[in-house]
Image (cartoon, coloured by chain):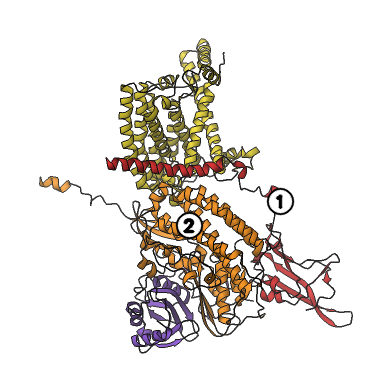
Chain colours: A red, B orange, C yellow, D purple
């Protein structure tokens, strides 16, 4: 008789645990407005991206098309993947001195691991991380970017 | 009668043949590109031979041509589910070698971050565990809660998974102004969500039937096979390095090392669930007491380690993670060895799964919480 | 042609009379077969598609997701898009497979499902076959489906498929027993095996209420065993995704896979429909003893709606199981049957017999 | 056991071992010929009881190969670093310790795979990550022009 009671209580206990689990899922079933899915391309406008989000390396230019990059190449040294290439040129300053300046700041987005070491190392704060994250392209070559805009020049007062 | 005896068939005569099944490299329950060569007799597993290397990325070789701060971001990509702990291990190892002491603020933040990644990692483990057992809903509940931690990571570290937050000498950034508020809100919320995990899965009679008394690992075997982390603690092997060799701010907090002496699949499950509670305790003790100060020390542009060998052990989410740096005084390490927890844990699987069924093999593997890049490196 | 949503007998009768007036008996029969066949095909295809959509939406709701949302409003056309995709896919036959059996298996599975549907009464007058031994027909025919699964697993020449098929065989053969016995419990109460008779017997009160405790136990057992027979979670060992990738249909693609997929959902419908017919009164409205006005309001709802309302309720219950519970292990699934469901069932039959004998039912 | 006691205890076990206090742990170097007995003693000796091998690292040291064993005693909580050098660099051979610590079996596989150090009496010595026709990438003279890009 004892074993029969044990048998029945075992079954009832088992069913109870099953019902507990079903209650959890039911709770969410009957509160469908609490769903956590985000409809991605539609919610682009309301999408909140943290300001520190590491999407790509960008070089901010001000309204006069001026940047802060001196072309020192520290970011290139610090990059673990070789995704930054600095091509520098020498320009004549107004005083008639030769000075090194950036010709092209080439950034290979396809090789970048977004480790932030270049930004941390940059002595002038010329490059920062941008929040853009939609990097899909049709052609791999378009992942190689030149960060300094054409015709841009270095900001006044920024020195190596 | 003699003729009759000859044709009589005993149970020994109707033995089935053993056959080999390749579980993987593409298989839903190997959690990545792992191949298990399983020797089966019917449903019974006779031998499991793991074959790895499908995602071997040669990180140890790559580090030999990188400088010390650059190593950190590669370790993100090993155990990507607890990336912060790997960063921390490298950072601590370099700091130890340079014999510098980071500010208390750094230690506190590192500890909080490590515990948050442990929580995130265990949450993902929980969802996958449920999915391996066939309860598909767990996957979404676990990910739902993990998402909030990743949002916190995104806000402070700028990345969700491969954070690269701990660098030699401190942290990449200071914490975000909202960090403390968000973490506290998350802990408050997750304290109500974690019992839900229990109600949905831990208490379920099907789940307990499938895990209790299945896949035993004894303490001696755990030590012999070098099994660490929650997997070993479920067998009674007190190997929590946070407790026994405290680093960062772990010496300043009170927490229990979760131990169980049963050693079956259910014990491994419960240890991880309990560790989530402990992680929340640790975070709550630290979050309000983050001291003021610098978030990073001023380091030289080029970090050169003195000649010698340096070893740092940290407790990652799946066990003991070790960084062994051999330096010859240059800016690149001479040799770096990562002792990954998954590697040692994985190879105990043959010992444990022998004699159990295929379904048990899946459950056992799930409780090992394998991350394949962590094994392959 | 009189159309009455409450009773389809007049409609079918008028069609039959109209046809016999202008054609010979054989031609009439052929035309009627064609009509019925096309109607069933359409019903199965549409209801199958609807169930796939419903399953995805229901599971999404359980998991705090939204489910398919992209194709059509609220993703309504998603399953149709999926179906078209499956139609267009290449039919791959493994090189070492037993070609004949491999191609035969999906048809066996789907034909069996069609056979069982033919005895289900959707509404008054909307039932194709009404055997004297209708219940017996259902239990007998539905167990043939396992042959298709076994063939699929064997002929694919894949170890995963074979393990899945063997699991499925062991499972369905065992659970067949519980399904049969729980139906017998109700047959004792009803006193007939004819399906129309079963429904008719529930005019005053559904059997689940009439037979109270034993009927309720039988219902629970039937739902569990029925879930197991359809190879759905938590009893989806045959296709256990995390263990056997896709079990017996691992090697199938395109429309042949779609047949297995559709058959799963038709079987789901069949189990729900049988539960409805036997326990929940089929198309009979809900009646409460002497509440005349209530009963009359209930009578206003057509039988067809009652039937589908109940069927969908039972299907929802089974989806709820699937999306909540972890999967059982192969030895536990047999334990559950032989150590729990079978003894309970046998005891339950005794109990029901006593209830009927002493007139203890309502 | 303090580190000084550990050093003397190890000296008793193996006279040829050169033991010293390293930056972190006690480090000892044993000749390759004596290593198996020495390791066995470390495990069996009740006062030492190094039962947990937590790291096994192979290293290319230009003129020889070296394997570093990190051992811990779970009971006594002391750590020992054992260093074994191979005589030959091109065809290095050492004794396997996989029957002392089962975990060593797979770590030794890894060392064989990446450095080409063979282990005697190893139950299943195979390439773990790489193909048979790869070289041994962690050797310092490893050249692979296709896969390794250097700046």
Residue B105 image position (x, y, % from top left): 62, 71
Which one is nearer the viewer's eye here, B1 or B259? B259
Is the residue under label 2 in contact with that under label 1 (CB below 8 Å)? no
Residue A134 image position (x, y, % from top left): 69, 57
Asked which quadrant contains residue D20, the reply is: bottom left
Whether residue C323 sits left or right of residue A121 in the image: it is: left
Q: Residue furthest left?
A: B1
Q: In this picture, is C65 found above or below C294?
A: below
> What is the CA distance from the residue labelled 1 to the residue labelled 2?
36 Å
Which one is nearer the viewer's eye here, C186 or B359? C186
- Please give the chain letter of the residue carrying mark 1: A
Q: From the image, tell me which residue sits under label 2.
A: B273
Q: From the image, tell me which residue sits under label 1.
A: A44
Residue B132 appears anywhere in the view:
yes
Whether residue A94 sits left or right of residue B193 in the image: it is: right
Asked which quadrant contains residue C278, the reply is: top left
Quadrant in the picture for the N terminus of chain B: top left
Q: Residue at x 52, y 25 (%)?
A: C306
Residue C207 image position (x, y, % from top left): 41, 25
Asked which quadrant contains residue B218, the reply is: bottom left
- Please give the chain letter of the residue carrying mark 2: B
Which one is nearer the viewer's eye here, A3 or B141? A3
Residue B151 image position (x, y, % from top left): 63, 58
């Amino acid at each position: 008789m004892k074993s029969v009671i044990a048998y029945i209580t075992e079954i009832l206990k088992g069913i109870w645990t099953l019902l507990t689990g079903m209650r959890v899922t039911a709770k969410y079933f009957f509160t469908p407005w609490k769903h956590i899915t985000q409809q991605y391309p539609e919610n682009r406008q309301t999408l909140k991206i943290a300001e520190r989000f590491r999407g790509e390396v960008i070089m901010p230019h001000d309204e006069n098309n001026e940047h802060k990059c001196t072309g020192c190449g520290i970011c290139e040294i610090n990059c673990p993947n070789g995704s930054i290439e600095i091509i520098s040129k020498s320009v004549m300053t107004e005083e008639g001195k030769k000075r090194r300046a950036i010709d092209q700041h080439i950034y290979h987005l396809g090789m970048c691991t977004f480790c932030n070491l270049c930004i941390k190392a940059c002595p002038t704060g010329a490059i920062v991380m941008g929040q853009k994250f939609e990097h899909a392209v049709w052609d791999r070559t378009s992942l190689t970017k030149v960060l300094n805009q054409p015709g841009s020049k270095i900001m006044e007062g920024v020195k190596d | 009668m003699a003729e009759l005896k000859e044709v009589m068939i005993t149970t020994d005569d109707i033995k089935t043949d053993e056959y080999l099944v390749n579980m993987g490299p593409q298989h839903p329950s190997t959690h990545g590109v792992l191949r298990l060569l399983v020797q089966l007799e019917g449903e019974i597993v006779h031998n499991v031979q793991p074959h790895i290397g499908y995602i071997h990325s040669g990180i140890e070789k790559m580090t030999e041509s990188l400088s010390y701060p650059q190593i950190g971001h590669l370790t993100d990509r090993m155990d990507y589910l607890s990336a912060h702990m790997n960063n921390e291990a490298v950072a601590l190892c370099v700091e130890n070698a340079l014999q510098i002491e980071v500010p208390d603020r750094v230690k506190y933040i590192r500890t909080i971050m490590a515990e948050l990644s442990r929580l995130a990692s265990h949450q993902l483990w929980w969802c996958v565990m449920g999915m391996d057992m066939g309860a598909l809903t767990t996957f979404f509940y676990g990910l739902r809660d993990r998402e909030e931690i990743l949002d916190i990571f995104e806000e402070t570290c700028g990345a969700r998974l491969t954070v690269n937050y701990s660098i030699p000498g401190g942290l990449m950034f200071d914490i975000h102004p909202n960090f403390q508020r968000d973490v506290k809100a998350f802990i408050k919320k997750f304290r109500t969500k974690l019992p839900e995990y229990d109600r949905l899965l831990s208490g379920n009679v099907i789940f307990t039937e499938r895990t209790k008394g299945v896949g035993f690992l004894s303490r001696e075997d755990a030590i012999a096979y070098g099994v660490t982390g929650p997997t070993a603690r479920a067998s009674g092997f007190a190997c929590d390095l946070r407790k026994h060799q405290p680093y960062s701010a772990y010496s300043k907090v009170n927490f229990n090392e979760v131990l169980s002496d049963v050693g079956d699949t259910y014990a491994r499950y419960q240890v991880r669930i309990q560790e989530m509670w402990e992680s929340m305790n640790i975070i709550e003790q630290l979050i309000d007491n983050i001291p003021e100060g610098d978030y990073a020390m001023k380091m030289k542009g080029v970090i050169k380690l003195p000649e010698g060998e340096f070893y740092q052990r940290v407790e990652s989410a799946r066990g003991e993670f070790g960084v062994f740096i051999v330096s010859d005084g240059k800016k690149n390490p001479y040799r770096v060895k990562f002792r990954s927890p998954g590697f040692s844990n994985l190879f105990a699987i043959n010992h444990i799964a022998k004699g159990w069924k295929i379904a048990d093999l899946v459950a056992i593997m799930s409780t090992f919480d394998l991350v394949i890049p962590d094994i392959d490196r | 042609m009189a159309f009455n949503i409450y009773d389809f007998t007049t409609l079918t009768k008028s069609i039959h009379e109209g046809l016999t007036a202008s054609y010979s008996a054989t031609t009439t029969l052929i035309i009627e077969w064609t009509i019925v066949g096309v109607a069933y095909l359409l019903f199965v295809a549409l209801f199958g598609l609807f169930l796939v959509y419903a399953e995805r939406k229901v599971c999404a709701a359980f998991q705090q997701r939204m489910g398919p949302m992209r194709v059509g409003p609220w993703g309504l056309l998603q399953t149709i898009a999926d179906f078209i995709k499956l139609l267009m896919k290449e039919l791959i036959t493994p090189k070492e497979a037993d070609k004949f059996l491999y191609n035969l298996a999906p048809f066996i599975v789907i034909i069996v499902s069609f056979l069982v549907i033919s005895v289900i009464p959707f509404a008054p007058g909307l039932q194709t076959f009404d055997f004297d031994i209708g219940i017996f027909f259902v239990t007998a025919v539905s167990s043939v489906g396992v042959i298709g699964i076994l063939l699929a697993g064997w002929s694919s020449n894949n170890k995963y498929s074979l393990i899945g098929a063997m699991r499925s065989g062991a499972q369905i053969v065992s659970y067949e027993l519980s399904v049969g016995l729980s139906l017998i419990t109700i047959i004792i109460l009803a006193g007939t095996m004819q399906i129309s008779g079963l429904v008719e017997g529930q005019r005053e009160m559904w059997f689940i209420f009439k037979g109270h405790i034993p009927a309720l136990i039988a219902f629970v057992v039937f739902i569990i065993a029925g879930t197991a027979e359809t190879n759905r979670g938590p009893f989806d060992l045959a296709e256990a995704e995390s263990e056997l990738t896709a079990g017996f249909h691992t090697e199938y693609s395109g429309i042949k896979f779609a047949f297995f997929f559709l058959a799963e959902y038709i079987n789901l419908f069949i189990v729900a429909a049988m539960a409805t017919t036997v326990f929940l009164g089929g198309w009979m409205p809900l009646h409460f003893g002497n509440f005349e006005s209530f009963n009359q309001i209930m009578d206003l709802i057509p039988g067809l709606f009652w039937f589908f309302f109940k069927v969908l309720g039972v299907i929802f219950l089974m989806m709820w199981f699937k999306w909540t519970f972890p999967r059982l292990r192969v030895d536990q699934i047999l334990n559950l049957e032989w150590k729990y469901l079978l003894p309970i069932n046998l005891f339950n039959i005794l109990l029901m017999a006593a209830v009927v004998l002493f007139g203890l039912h309502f | 056991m303090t580190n000084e006691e550990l050093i003397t205890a190890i000296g008793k076990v193996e006279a040829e071992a050169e033991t010293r206090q390293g930056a972190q742990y006690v480090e000892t170097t044993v000749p390759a010929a004596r290593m198996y007995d020495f390791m066995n003693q470390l495990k069996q000796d009740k006062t030492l009881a190094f039962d947990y091998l937590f790291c096994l690292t192979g290293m290319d040291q230009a003129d020889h190969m070296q394997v570093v064993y990190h051992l811990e005693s779970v009971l006594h909580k002391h750590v020992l670093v054992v260093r074994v050098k191979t005589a030959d660099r091109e065809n290095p051979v050492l004794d396997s310790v996989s029957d002392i610590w089962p975990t060593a079996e797979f770590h030794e596989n890894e060392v064989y795979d990446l450095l080409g150090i063979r282990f005697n009496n190893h139950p299943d010595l195979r390439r773990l990550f790489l193909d048979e026709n790869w070289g041994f990438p962690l050797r310092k003279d490893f050249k692979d022009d296709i896969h390794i890009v250097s700046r």
